[in-house]
Amino acid sequence: MSQPSKVSGTGEYYKGAAQETLGSIIGNTGMQAEGAKQKATGDAEIKAAKTQGYAEGTKDRLTGHVKETAGSVVGNEQMQAEGKGSKLSGEAQQKINQ
């Protein structure tokens, strides 16, 4: 299985929703069930991608915090700035993946 993706998960979700709706309209319970299954698969992929993105953001935030603190302790402004940048990037990634 490839990496989870919010884009492909969203595509699967909406394809499944369309199939489920069409099955409901024409009275085809098999099509309706298959659409519901595809929709659930897409939703699971979206959630997995968000979880992965949040975890990566946490790693970047913590690594940045350590680097920023170390730069502050040793008086290295460049290290401090790089650490702050990583920390802010990680926080942003966490926020978009909540």
Image (tube, helix red, strand yellow):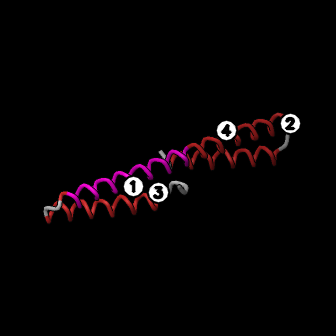
Q: Amino acid at mark 3?
A: Lys
- Residue corresponding to mark 2: 74
Name the amino acid, label 4: Leu
Q: Which disc, if any, is residue 42?
A: 1
| Element assignment for label 3 | helix
Quarter occupied by residue 15: bottom left
Q: Nearer the viewer, mark 2 or mark 1?
A: 1
For the point 69% across and 49% down, the residue is: 85
Residue located 70% across and 42% down the image: 64
Q: Which residues are magenta?
A: 30-54
Quick check: 29 left or right of 40? left
Which secondary structure, mark 4?
Answer: helix
Between disc 1 and disc 3, the foreground one is 1
Say which residue appears at 48% left-offset and 48% top-offset.
48
Q: Which mark is residue 62?
A: 4
Q: How far is disc 2 from disc 3 in space, using C-alphas?
A: 41 Å
Say whether disc 4 or disc 2 marks the residue closer to the N-terminus.
4
Which mark is in front, 2 or 3? 3
Q: Which sits earlier in the primary sequence, circle 2 or circle 3?
A: 3
User: Which residue bears the numbered disc 3?
Assistant: 6
